[in-house]
Image (spheres, rainbow, N blue to C red):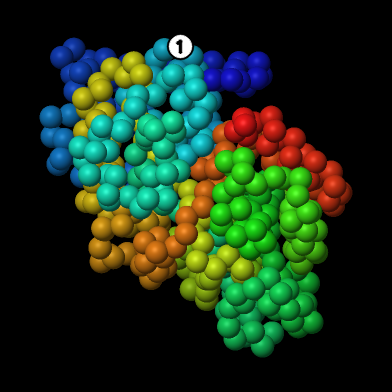
């Protein structure tokens, strides 16, 4: 892995600590070969509940193996990624680890740290169970290296029904012009910042949703595969529109996490928030029922996806056990057990909707028919180095609003970290 000296040093410290714990719990005489160490950052809440559901299916389907929980809590996954980087550098991989599906895996693939799972996709019927758009996004030089456990949708606009009603808004906007008109109505009704927004990746998500509206799914995909230029007039227009959109957001956005922005929505201080569909599970858990959802205006029938997936690292001590875990992850039973508790939806299109809440049922229907595009801040569209460059550029733009500077920075990031022509 390509790490800065600072990150590498932290990673080694974390990794040494975790490796000691993992070895003490797994190297028991006669049992080590049967244990499957599953490395995740799912340590609590709905994520832990989803993992527990998946483990229950694994214990039934893979009775000859034993699940070993390698979860590392904290930092929204950053702590786990540091530990993982250190272990991979020391040639001490877990049997499998969680990673965002798609381009975020490119560093591991380029460093020859993952096994090709293409044969297992054929053997387990996953090529037909997953939609073609997902298969295309997972395929790197003709090979597939991960099995997605779920699908989250990024381009969802959440709303406070009462706030909208007070402003006389009775239906969801389907175009950007209609959305701006509704935002103006909300301001006129006394809502100072009708679009709640947080910092970092939350701003990237909002910008990407607007890019989809401006470019359409094919040209949006082209931003990440190199067929759409970041220097074009259409990108200038999109950034200019994004700058206008920021005027409807809370001025303290750069100090807010996504849950802080969500609280503005719940408290009636905002009418909208663009956020991934984990928000539905969070709002339900917090007892807030007065919410609605729609696809971001102008995105039409486009489903912007991200996914958690599992891989088979090279040098895994229990490859057979890992393959049984991966088969469970990709199975219809495993995906139902995991996603009903996690708040996401199955990557498979053949899982029934029984047991899923209303939002998830709607998302499952869309997943079968919508045009699929990936997400950069969530790793399906771009590698971690590219994510970091985009995040820095957008953070600066949130403060200075310099359209030309943002476009130049985005074009430079694509030239440095994107596909080479």
User: In the image, is 116 to the left or to the right of 45?
Assistant: left
Q: Position of residue 285 (x, y in %)?
A: 45, 62
Q: Position of residue 151 (x, y in %)?
A: 41, 52
User: In the image, is 399 to the left or to the right of 223?
Assistant: right
Q: Which residue does the image show at 74% across and 40% down from the upper left?
A: 411
Q: Nearer the viewer, residue 81 or 118?
A: 118
Q: Residue at label 1? A: 90
Q: Quadrant of residue 193?
A: bottom right
Q: Which residue does the image show at 25% across and 21% down from the upper left?
A: 318
Q: Can residue 209 be seen in this snapshot?
A: no
Q: Position of residue 43 (x, y in %)?
A: 42, 40
Other-residue count near label 1 (Cα within 10 Å), few / some / many at <14 / 14–19 / ≥20? few
| SS type, badge 1 | loop
Q: Nearer the viewer, residue 177 or 291?
A: 177
Residue 25 lies, with reference to residue 153, above or below; the image says: above
User: In the image, is 382 to the left or to the right of 99?
Assistant: right
Residue 181 lies, with reference to residue 259, above or below; the image says: below
Quadrant into which the N terminus falls:
top right
Q: Which residue does the image show at 38% across and 45% down from the upper left?
A: 135
């Amino acid at each position: 892995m390509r790490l800065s000296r600072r990150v590498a040093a932290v990673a080694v410290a974390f990794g040494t600590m975790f490796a000691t714990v993992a070895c003490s719990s797994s190297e028991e005489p006669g049992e080590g070969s049967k244990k499957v160490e599953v490395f995740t950052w799912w340590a609590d809440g709905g994520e832990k509940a989803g993992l527990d559901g998946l483990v229950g299916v694994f214990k039934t389907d893979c009775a000859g193996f034993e699940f070993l929980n390698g979860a590392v809590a904290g930092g929204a996954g950053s702590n786990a990624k540091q530990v993982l980087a250190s272990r991979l550098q020391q040639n001490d991989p877990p049997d499998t680890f969680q990673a965002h599906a798609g381009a975020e895996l490119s560093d591991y693939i380029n460093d020859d740290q993952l096994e090709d799972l293409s044969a297992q996709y054929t053997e387990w019927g996953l090529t037909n169970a997953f939609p073609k758009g997902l298969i295309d996004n997972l395929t790197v030089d003709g090979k597939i290296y991960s099995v997605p456990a779920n699908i989250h949708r990024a381009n969802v606009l959440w709303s406070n029904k009462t706030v909208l009603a007070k402003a006389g808004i009775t239906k969801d906007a389907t175009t950007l012009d209609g959305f701006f008109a509704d935002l103006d109505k909300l301001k006129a009704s006394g809502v100072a910042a009708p679009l709640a927004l947080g910092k970092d990746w939350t701003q990237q998500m909002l910008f990407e949703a607007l890019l989809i509206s401006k470019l359409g799914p094919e040209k949006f995909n082209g931003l990440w595969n190199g067929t759409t230029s970041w220097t074009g007039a259409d990108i200038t227009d999109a950034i200019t529109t994004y700058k206008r959109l920021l005027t409807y957001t809370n001025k303290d956005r750069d100090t807010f996490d996504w849950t802080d922005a969500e609280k503005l929505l719940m408290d009636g201080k905002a009418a909208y928030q663009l956020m991934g569909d984990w928000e539905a599970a969070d709002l339900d858990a917090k007892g807030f029922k007065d919410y609605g959802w729609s696809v971001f205006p102008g995105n039409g029938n486009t489903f912007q996806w991200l996914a958690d997936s599992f891989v088979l690292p090279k040098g895994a001590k229990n490859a057979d056990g890992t393959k049984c875990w991966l088969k469970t992850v990709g199975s219809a039973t495993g995906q139902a057990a995991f996603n009903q508790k996690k708040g996401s939806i199955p990557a498979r299109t053949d899982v029934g909707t029984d047991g899923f809440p209303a939002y998830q049922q709607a998302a499952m229907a869309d997943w079968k028919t919508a045009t699929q595009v990936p997400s950069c801040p969530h790793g399906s569209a771009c590698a971690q180095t590219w994510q970091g460059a985009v995040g820095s550029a957008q953070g600066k733009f949130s403060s200075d609003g310099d359209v030309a500077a943002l476009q130049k920075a985005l074009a430079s990031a694509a030239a440095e970290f994107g596909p080479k022509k």
